[in-house]
Image (cartoon, rainbow, N blue to C red):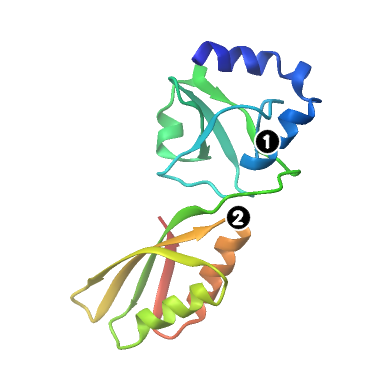
Amino acid sequence: DDQFIIQSLENSSQSSNNPQFTALSNLNGIIVGQERNIMLKFCKNCSPLEGENIQGVISKGKGVKIHRLGCKYLLEADEKRIVDVRWDDEAINTSLRPVQLQVLCEDTPGVLANMSRAITTSGFNIGNVHLRKLSNGRGLARLEVMLKSLEDLENVIKRLRQEDGILEVTRR
């Protein structure tokens, strides 16, 4: 219930020292206002990673949805529903989230293997791959990579850019 969430945020200073709230916060890695016990969802469109600038939007009946700054859904949200959120430095478990990467590459044998090796040797899993052959001897790969943090993303992009046949890597 939206009213419960708003009331919880207003009363957060009373509960922020409760160990139960800390334990729950440590599972999702986000603090909403001063509150650590708020139902959260991460926006699937922007898929925020630990270390990125974020804001929350109180959604009807679904708690607070976490967005990266600049996300089109955050920009379209009712200002009255936007709340301050931040990453919890004390979090013990930051879950993996799907991040969409777009890779422009040469259309040559082995380039997909190079991309896969760059990601997996960095310690991450590929959740999904879509490949498309372009008319100019190039290919376009859309990869879903499971990551935890902005640092992870930067490392994966750096590794991909070092591979033979990779022309450009961007986050979607």
Foreground residue, 48 or 124? 124
Where's the C terminus, which quadrant?
bottom left
Res 128 → quadrant: bottom left
| Amino acid type for the residue under numbered disc 2 | Ser
Q: Dot 1, crowdedness within 10 Å: few (<14), some or many (≥20)?
A: many
- x, y (%) of residue 62? 46, 25
- Furthest-left residue in this view: 135
Q: Residue 111 vs residue 71: left or right?
A: left
Q: Residue 95 vs residue 92: left or right?
A: left
Foreground residue, 81 or 128? 128
Q: Residue 121 vs residue 17: left or right?
A: left
The disc, 2 or 1, on the residue closer to the chain's N-terminal end is 1
Looking at the rendered structure, the secondary structure element under dot 1 is helix
- Furthest-front residue in this view: 20
Cα separation, mark 2 vs mark 1, equals 17 Å
Residue at the disc numbered 1 = 25
Residue at the disc numbered 2 = 149
